[in-house]
C-alpha cells in the first residue's frame, strides 16, 4: 500500500499560558512512501518522528495537510478503520492473557462482515506467530517471556490483522545490544516476506540505515533529507545530517577557502575548485583520512584503538570542533603511528564543506 503525506502539519498548543507560543511538532511534511518498502523516520528526541507516525495511524489528527493510503484520503478516518498495525516501544501486551490470546485479541474485536470464525482466527494467529518464530510459546504469559520474545508477540499481534501498513514506534529501544541486532534483522526479514509497507521510527541511525530502503532525517519537525541510507551518508545536504549519520561520527573542523584551496588552520589540505573564498565548516568522515608522512593535515596523536582489521587513530587538532579526531585506517597503515603526531592526506569524496551561517552544504568538484 502506497502512503502519501501532503503538507502534513501538527501544531500543539503551548503549555505555557503566559507565552502562548504553539509548538510545531511536524511542519509541512510531504513525502510518498512507495508500496512494499521499509521507511525509517530518523532523528533526535523531539524531532516529530513519532508524531508523524501517530498521524499516519490515526491516533492523532493533523492540524493541516492530508494522508492518503493508495488513492484513498484517510485523513479523517478513525484509527480502527485505517487497516494499520501499530507496535509500540513498550510492547503494550495484556499481562493476564497468554501469547495466543494477545495475538487473537485484534481479531476477536472485529465486527460485522469483518468478523471471522473461530478456526480461521486461530489459523491466522498461528501463522503470525510462526512468522515471528514464537509458535512454541503460545501458552505462556508475557511475564514468562524475554524482552525480545515480548517484542515478537507485539509484532505478531500487529500482523495478524493483515494490515495495509505496519507502523513501528522505536520497537527495539528496550532491548539489549545483542537482541537489538537480532530483532532488527528479524523485522527486515518479516517485512520482506510479507511485503507490507512499513514505517519504522528510531533515533538510532545505525538501526535505521541497516534495515531501511529509505530514510527520512528530521529535525524540530522539519524534514532535512530523504533518500537511500548510503546515498544520504555519502551526500549529506547540511551539517546536521552529516553529524547525525555515522559511527564514529564525522569529524568537524573550522576551515577557510582561499583561492579554491581549503585551509584547516594554516595548512592547505585540499583543492576545492569552484568554491568562493569564505569561512566554512569542514566535515571529514573517519574513513576519509589516509596516513601519509607528507600529508598536509597534521594532528597530535593521543592513542590507537585496535578494532581487528581496522584501527582507529585518536588525535586532536586545534581547529577541530570535536574533542578528538577519529580516523579509521588499515591496521597495516597504522603500524607507523607511534610518534607524537600523525599526518594525513584526505579522500576528497569523504570531505564535505558547509556554509558557516546556514550550515547548508557547499559543493565542490571532486576529481
Image: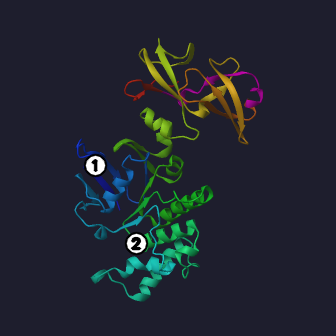
Res 350 → quadrant: top right
Disc 2 versus disc 1: distance between alpha carbons? 39 Å
Q: What is the x, y in percent for residue 153?
A: 50, 71
Element on which disc 2 rests: loop
User: Is 197 or 92 nearer to us in this picture?
Assistant: 92
Q: Is residue 101 above or below residue 147?
A: below
Q: Residue 330 carries which label?
A: none
Give the residue displayed 69% in from the left and 25% down from the top. Answer: 301
Between tags 2 and 1, which lies in front? 1
Residue 230 seen: yes
Q: What is the x, y in percent for residue 268?
A: 56, 15
Tally the numbered discs: 2
Q: In this view, does 25 lie above or below 236?
A: below
Q: What is the x, y in percent for residue 286?
A: 60, 33
> In this image, 219 relative to 210: left or right?
left
Q: Mark 2 points at which residue?
A: 162
Residue extending furthest toward the front = 18
Q: What is the x, y in percent for residue 169?
A: 43, 58
State which region is magenta.
334-352
> In this image, 125 relative to 1: left or right?
right
Q: Which of marks 2 and 1 is nearer the N terminus?
A: 1
User: Is 340 or 12 nearer to us in this picture?
Assistant: 12
Residue 10 shown in magenta:
no
Element on which disc 1 rests: loop
Q: In this view, does 116 lie above or below 262?
A: below
Q: Mark 1 points at which residue?
A: 15
Residue 126 seen: no
> In this image, 146 relative to 273: left or right?
right
Amino acid at each position: 500500500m502506497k502512503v502519501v503525506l501532503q503538507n502534513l502539519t501538527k501544531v500543539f498548543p503551548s503549555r505555557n499560558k503566559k507565552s502562548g507560543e504553539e509548538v510545531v511538532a511536524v511542519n509541512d511534511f510531504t513525502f510518498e512512501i512507495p508500496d512494499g518498502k521499509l521507511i525509517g523516520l530518523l532523528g533526535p528526541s523531539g524531532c516529530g518522528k513519532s508524531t508523524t507516525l501517530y498521524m499516519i495511524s490515526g491516533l492523532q489528527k493533523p492540524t493541516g495537510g492530508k494522508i492518503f493510503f493508495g488513492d484513498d484520503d484517510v485523513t479523517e478516518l478513525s484509527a480502527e478503520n485505517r487497516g494499520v498495525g501499530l507496535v509500540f516501544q513498550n510492547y503494550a501486551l495484556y499481562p493476564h492473557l497468554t501469547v495466543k490470546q494477545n495475538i487473537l485479541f485484534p481479531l476477536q474485536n472485529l465486527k460485522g462482515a469483518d468478523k471471522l470464525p473461530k478456526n480461521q482466527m486461530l489459523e491466522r494467529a498461528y501463522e503470525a506467530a510462526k512468522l515471528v518464530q514464537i509458535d512454541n510459546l503460545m501458552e505462556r504469559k508475557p511475564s514468562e517471556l524475554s524482552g525480545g520474545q515480548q517484542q515478537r508477540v507485539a509484532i505478531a499481534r500487529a500482523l495478524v490483522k493483515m494490515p495495509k501498513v505496519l507502523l513501528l514506534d522505536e520497537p527495539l529501544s528496550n532491548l539489549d545490544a545483542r537482541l537489538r541486532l537480532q530483532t532488527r534483522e528479524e523485522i527486515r526479514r518479516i517485512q520482506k516476506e510479507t511485503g507490507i509497507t512499513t514505517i519504522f521510527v528510531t533515533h538510532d541511525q545505525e538501526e535505521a540505515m541497516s534495515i531501511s530502503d529509505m530514510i527520512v532525517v528530521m529535525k524540530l519537525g522539519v524534514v532535512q533529507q530523504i533518500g537511500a541510507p548510503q546515498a544520504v551518508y555519502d551526500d549529506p545536504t547540511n551539517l546536521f545530517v552529516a553529524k547525525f549519520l555515522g559511527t564514529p561520527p564525522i569529524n568537524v573542523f573550522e576551515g577557510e577557502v582561499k583561492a579554491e584551496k581549503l585551509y584547516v588552520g594554516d595548512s592547505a589540505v585540499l583543492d576545492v575548485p569552484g568554491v568562493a573564498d569564505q569561512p566554512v565548516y569542514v566535515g571529514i568522515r573517519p574513513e576519509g583520512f589516509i596516513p601519509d608522512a607528507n600529508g598536509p593535515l597534521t594532528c597530535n596523536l593521543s592513542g590507537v584503538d585496535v578494532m581487528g582489521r581496522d584501527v582507529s587513530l585518536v588525535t586532536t587538532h586545534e581547529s577541530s570542533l570535536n574533542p578528538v579526531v577519529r580516523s579509521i585506517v588499515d591496521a597495516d597503515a597504522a603500524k607507523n603511528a607511534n610518534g607524537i603526531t600523525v599526518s594525513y592526506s584526505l579522500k576528497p569524496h569523504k570531505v564535505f564543506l558547509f556554509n558557516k551561517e546556514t550550515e547548508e552544504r557547499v559543493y565542490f568538484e571532486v576529481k
